[in-house]
Image (spheres, rainbow, N blue to C red):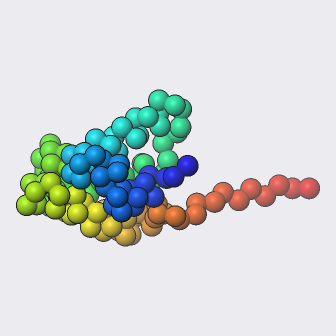
Amino acid sequence: MVDLYDLICNIKKRPAMYLGRASIPNLRTFLAGYCFACRQIGIPQTLQEKQFSEFQTWIQQRFNLTSNQTWDQIILFFSQDEYTALDQFFKLFGEFTQTEHSSEFQPNATNNLIVVSGT
């Protein structure tokens, strides 16, 4: 199964295939639906999904806002249109994943648990 950050990278490559129309509101709706579907079929929240839940706060801090607008609305407000807002999302998402606090959640990072058993 593709993890959340790989999915976002795939969307960046072919947004219309995943979103119908390449727009930031469609992206937010798609990601919310993806997470909802995972919970509905019993897949526990992943580390990447937990980190991505911090994206809203990060965006508010990045734009120095304390509003109740969602991350897509904030990015759209500071963009020319929905298409450029989508492009801006991918740039901001790259910054977000490069932040110091998110190193353990990098795309394709291995978070292996090593179990040592005594013999």
Quadrant containing the C terminus is: bottom right
Report whether residue 61 is seen: no
Residue at x 36% of width, y 37% of height = 33
Q: Is residue 65 left or right of residue 30?
A: left
Residue lying farthest to the top in this orientation: 40
Compared with 35, 47 (above or below) is: below
Q: Is residue 26 left or right of residue 107?
A: left
Residue at x 48% of width, y 42% of height = 45
Compared with 17, 44 (above or below) is: above
How many marks can you see? 0
Q: Is residue 52 left or right of residue 89?
A: right
Report whether residue 13 is seen: yes
Q: Nearer the viewer, residue 81 or 74?
A: 81
Residue at x 58% of width, y 60% of height = 111
Residue lying farthest to the right in this orientation: 119
How far across and how far down the image is residue 93, in percent? Answer: 31, 62
Q: In which quadrant of the rendered view does residue 103 lie?
A: bottom left
How far across and how far down the image is residue 107, in percent? Answer: 47, 63
Q: In which quadrant of the rendered view does residue 59 lie?
A: bottom left
How far across and how far down the image is residue 22, in percent? Answer: 24, 53
Q: Nearer the viewer, residue 45 or 115?
A: 45
Compared with 41, 65 (above or below) is: below
Compared with 55, 87 (above or below) is: below
Residue at x 30% of width, y 68% of height = 95
How far across and how far down the image is residue 8, in percent? Answer: 38, 56
